[in-house]
């Protein structure tokens, strides 16, 4: 993926926002995840804003950045009003709503199912970025936490059951990745059973 000047400046802002955050299992700088999501999404989706939404998709959840801060930075970088609006909308759509802090009365399964239904209603560009996000996260979680991975993958399949408006080729790739990850877990489980 080749970034434009504006996209490079935006990536620097994203790196600054995520600061010292690390990926949970690999301990790589967190920004490497959002860059990977942008790379995956941009391979399939050529719509303006897809790279920017992917780079920013975790800002509102995981950093000090909010809509006002991101809007100001996008304008400062040189994004016009229409593109700024597209990016803000996509990032907002991808920001989890049904989180434990806001819905403590719901258990994880209930929150994740409500989030899946909500994600089924977001725009096609944001859905495409979510497919790329799921693709990148799945392999990381299977490698880093196979015990939790089966729960995680089933939650993500529930999301995909709701989200069918994004890029079809990216959706297919995401489904294939999740299926491959589940198959890998099954094979590892069978290997453990044979050794016992």
Image (spheres, helix red, strand yellow):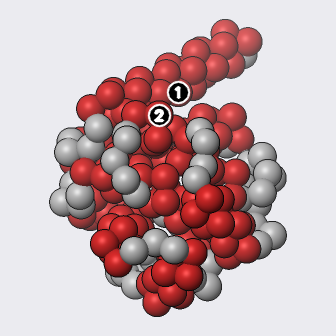
Q: Residue 123 location, x and y as percent?
A: 23, 58
Front position in the image: 156 or 47? 47
Residue 133 is situated, as x and y percent measured from the top left of the image, at 49, 48
107 shown above or below 60 = above
For the point 33% across and 56% down, which residue is it?
A: 126
Marks 1 and 2, the one that precedes in the sequence: 2
Q: Secondary structure at mark 1?
A: helix
Note whether residue 23 is visible.
yes
Report the quarter where the N terminus lies: top right
In front of the other: 72 or 148 = 72
Q: What mark, if any, has residue 115 been given in the picture? A: none
Neighbours of disc 1 within 10 Å: few (<14), some (14-19), many (20+): many
Q: Write down the quadrant of residue 73 in the picture.
A: bottom right
Callout 2 secondary element: helix
Position of 122 compared to 74: left or right?
A: left
Q: Residue at x 78, y 46 (%)?
A: 26
Q: Judge from the rendering whether residue 107 lies leftward or rightward of residue 192; answer left or right.
A: left
Question: In which quarter of the view is residue 49 placed?
Answer: bottom left
Say above or below: 61 vs 52.
below
Residue closest to the far bottom: 68
Which mark is on residue 181? 1
Residue 130 can be seen, yes or no: no
Q: Distance of mark 1 from mark 2, alpha carbons?
A: 21 Å
- The circle on residue 43 is 2
Residue 175, above or below 45: above
Q: Is 184 positioned to the left or the right of 18 in the image?
A: left
Residue at x 60%, y 49% (from the top left corner): 3
Q: Quadrant of the C terminus?
A: top right
Between 165 and 141, the one nearer to me in the picture: 165
Q: Residue at (68%, 19%) from the top-left corner?
A: 192
Neighbourhood count class around disc 2 (C-alpha, 10 Å): few under 14, some 14–19, many 20 upward: few
């Amino acid at each position: 993926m080749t970034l434009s000047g504006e996209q490079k400046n935006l990536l620097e802002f994203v790196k600054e926002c995520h600061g010292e955050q690390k990926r949970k299992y690999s301990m790589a700088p967190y920004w490497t995840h959002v860059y990977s999501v942008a790379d995956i999404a941009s391979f399939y989706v050529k719509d303006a804003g897809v790279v920017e939404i992917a780079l920013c998709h975790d800002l509102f959840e995981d950093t000090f950045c909010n809509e006002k801060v991101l809007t100001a930075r996008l304008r400062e970088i040189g994004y016009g009003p229409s593109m700024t609006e597209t990016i803000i909308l996509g990032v907002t759509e991808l920001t989890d709503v049904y989180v434990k802090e806001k819905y403590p009365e719901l258990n994880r399964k209930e929150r994740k199912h409500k989030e899946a239904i909500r994600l089924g209603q977001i725009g096609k560009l944001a859905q495409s970025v979510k497919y790329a996000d799921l693709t990148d996260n799945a392999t990381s979680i299977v490698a880093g936490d196979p015990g939790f991975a089966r729960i995680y993958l089933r939650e993500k399949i529930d999301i995909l059951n709701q989200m069918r408006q994004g890029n079809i080729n990216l959706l297919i790739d995401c489904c294939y990745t999740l299926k491959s990850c589940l198959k890998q877990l099954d094979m590892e489980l069978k290997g453990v059973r044979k050794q016992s």
